[in-house]
Image (cartoon, rainbow, N blue to C red):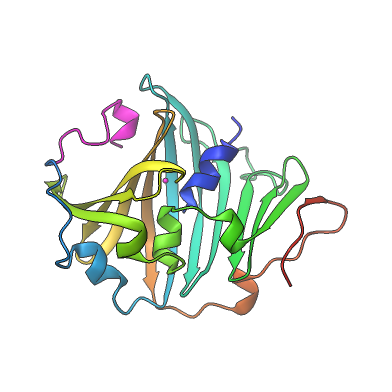
Amino acid sequence: MRTSTGLCRQLVSCCVLAAAGLSLQAGVARAVPADPAATPLDTYLSGLKTLRASFVQTLVDAQGRETDRTSGTLIVQRPGRFRWEIQPQRVDGAGAGPGGPAADAGQLMVCDGTNLWFYDRELGQVTVKPVDAALSATPVMLLSGAADIRRDFTVAPAGERSGLTWVLVTPRAAAADFRQALLGFSSGELRRMILEDKLGQTATVIFSSIQRNAPVNAAEVSFQPPPGVDVIGTPRQ
């Protein structure tokens, strides 16, 4: 099953409550009005310089049907650099084949601090835009430090459920790519992200193998289009 390119962009997209067909707020205490007091998200971002994590992402449509499942890795280097790479999986959780996902499958999104690169391996196509022209308010922008948390989002505590402490993040801009996101924390670490888009789709990202402030090589948050691929757009130099 092919990964939803649009939702991958939104998660940067950066993700199983959604798989059960529940709404984003189901079972989670309704958020109180945004308060300037620190939330678990503020605490988490304080002192965050780099982040490495693996994830499994499940996409559910407005009718509660699981339509896509991917796995991948996230690398963040603050401020403003990240790498979000995904590989498709079958909905039954199995890999793409005996040897795992094909090298020409999946998508890669890299923000190098100047440009945002989106590489669709299946299409053999790269799209590039300057960061300030490409990114509206998205959760990975927030994690990477490319967005001002209090300027670009409303942030409010959203209670506790399933052993996680939740924070509700809502973009202030009407043109943002997602309606709202729930971020779930445990022992100070981000464990889960539930994102609802404007079409009623819900993506749930479950993080694992989390490494906070581990070394990140410059090459990991840089991108050079592979030979022979189509490049759409002009990068800023």
Question: Outermost residue toward the top?
Answer: 63
Q: Is residue 223 magenta?
A: no
Q: Residue at x 47, y 48 (%)?
A: 11
Return the x and y of residue 237 as percentages of the image width and height: 74, 73
Q: Residue at x 39, y 70 (%)?
A: 211
Return the x and y of residue 215 as percentages of the image width and height: 49, 80
Return the x and y of residue 9 as percentages of the image width and height: 55, 46
Q: Nearer the viewer, residue 93 or 108?
A: 108
Q: Is residue 26 magenta?
A: yes
Tell me where residue 113 sits by quadrant.
bottom right
Tell me where residue 66 sits by quadrant.
top left
Residue 24, visible in the rendered structure: yes
Q: Quadrant of the N terminus?
A: top right
Number of numbered discs present?
A: 0
Q: Specify the segment rendered in magenta.
A: 15-28
Is 41 located above or below residue 60 in the figure?
below
* Magenta span main SS: loop
Return the x and y of residue 127 as percentages of the image width and height: 71, 51
Residue 95, visible in the rendered structure: no
Q: Is residue 168 left or right of residue 96?
A: left
Is 187 located above or below residue 165 in the figure?
below
Is 98 located above or below residue 66 in the figure?
below
Q: Nearer the viewer, residue 185 or 80?
A: 80
Q: Nearer the viewer, residue 63 or 115?
A: 115
Tell me where residue 85 sits by quadrant.
bottom right
Q: Residue at x 29, y 27 (%)?
A: 20
Q: Residue at x 51, y 40 (%)?
A: 7
Q: Is residue 96 left or right of residue 234?
A: left
